[in-house]
């Protein structure tokens, strides 16, 4: 798994989501890079990382573990956006002694509902027939709060163009892996580390009501609600998003 290693200090892993690569963290890298050691991977099939023959949340969590081993990092704070949060939860289940704090950034510990699985199946069929670019072009605007879509048209177009290199097989593999993931609310209930929740009021991918059912599960939760964001708070409300990250990281012990 290709990754960037930037800065020094408290280790923080930033795991991107579905339909993205590590470039999604550009503004967070600039904000945090001078104070912490940032580990920023490209998941299989994105960036400079080749797609793997078997792709699961657990296999990607093991890939993160391998990076930590390579860099001789014992434990870290894991911050995952959307699918990156699913990977972070799998990591917490598999390697609980390697995690100091967990961030679910527009993410969820719930498994997919049957309705969500059916939506993902339809997406896979669309991608196989039409390709990656048409899929990203159709789906990316819906990741933003409705009131932001017009004003952020240029940004949305840039996201689509920047990630259209992803092969249909990559996007389909991610969708299959997300459908197969189990419910991991027990990880939140048993967490002996703090958990950060960043929630978008207008998030259609991870509904606000679903997030609110989870924030009370850990013993120690940090909850930030972005009132003007959908699923992409790092871009929609960058300042508030970054402040939530630094508040959480700085308060999380090594």
Image (spheres, rainbow, N blue to C red):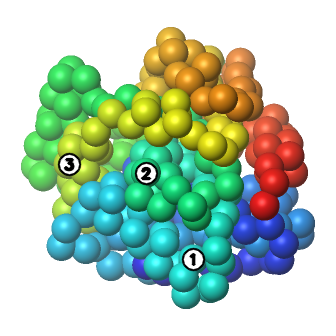
Q: Which mark is residue 103?
A: none
Q: Nearer the viewer, mark 1 or mark 2?
A: 2
Q: CA distance from mark 1 to mark 2?
A: 16 Å
State the residue position of label 1. Answer: 68
The residue wearing badge 3 is 176
Q: Quadrant of residue 23?
A: bottom right
Q: Secondary structure at mark 1?
A: helix
Q: Is residue 6 above or below residue 103?
A: below
Q: In the figure, is residue 199 to the left or right of 179?
A: right
Q: State the mark number for residue 93.
A: 2
Q: Quadrant of the C terminus?
A: bottom right
Front residue of this view, candidates 243 and 70: 70
Q: Is residue 179 left or right of residue 75?
A: left
The N terminus, quarter of image:
bottom left
Look at the picture and state if 67 lies above or below 243: below
Q: Are marks 1 and 2 in contact (CB under 8 Å)?
A: no
Dot 1, how many residues are within 10 Å of its Cα: few (below 14), some (14-19), or many (20+)? some
Q: Is residue 208 above or below residue 141?
A: above
The residue lying at 69 percent from left, 41 percent from top is: 194
For the point 12% across and 52% down, which residue is it? Answer: 128
| Disc 3 to disc 1, C-alpha distance | 26 Å
- The reply to whether callout 3 and callout 1 are in contact (CB within 8 Å) is no
Distance (Cα) linking label 2 and label 3: 20 Å
Query: Which percent across, then down, holds residue 35?
Result: 89, 66
């Amino acid at each position: 798994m290709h990754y960037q290693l930037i800065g020094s200090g408290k280790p923080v892993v930033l795991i991107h989501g579905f339909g993205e690569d590590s470039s999604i963290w550009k503004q967070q890298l600039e904000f945090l890079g001078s104070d912490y050691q940032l580990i920023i991977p490209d998941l299989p099939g994105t960036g400079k990382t080749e797609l793997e023959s078997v792709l699961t949340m657990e296999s990607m969590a093991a890939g993160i573990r391998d990076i930590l081993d390579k860099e001789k990092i014992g434990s870290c704070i894991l911050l995952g956006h959307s699918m990156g949060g699913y990977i972070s939860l799998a990591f917490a289940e598999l390697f609980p002694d390697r995690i100091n704090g967990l961030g679910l950034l527009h993410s969820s510990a719930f498994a997919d509902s049957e309705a969500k699985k059916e939506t993902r199946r339809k997406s896979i069929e669309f991608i196989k027939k039409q390709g990656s670019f048409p899929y990203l072009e159709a789906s990316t605007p819906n990741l933003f709060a409705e009131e932001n879509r017009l004003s952020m048209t240029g940004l949305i177009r840039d996201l689509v163009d920047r990630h259209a290199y992803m092969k249909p097989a990559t996007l389909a593999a991610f969708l299959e892996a997300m459908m197969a993931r189990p419910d991991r609310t027990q990880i939140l209930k048993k967490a002996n580390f703090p958990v950060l929740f960043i929630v978008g009021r207008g998030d259609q991918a991870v509904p606000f009501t679903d997030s609110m059912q989870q924030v009370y599960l850990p013993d120690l939760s940090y909850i930030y609600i972005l009132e003007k964001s959908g699923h992409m708070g790092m871009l929609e409300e960058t300042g508030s998003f970054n402040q939530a990250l630094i508040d959480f990281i700085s308060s999380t012990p090594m």
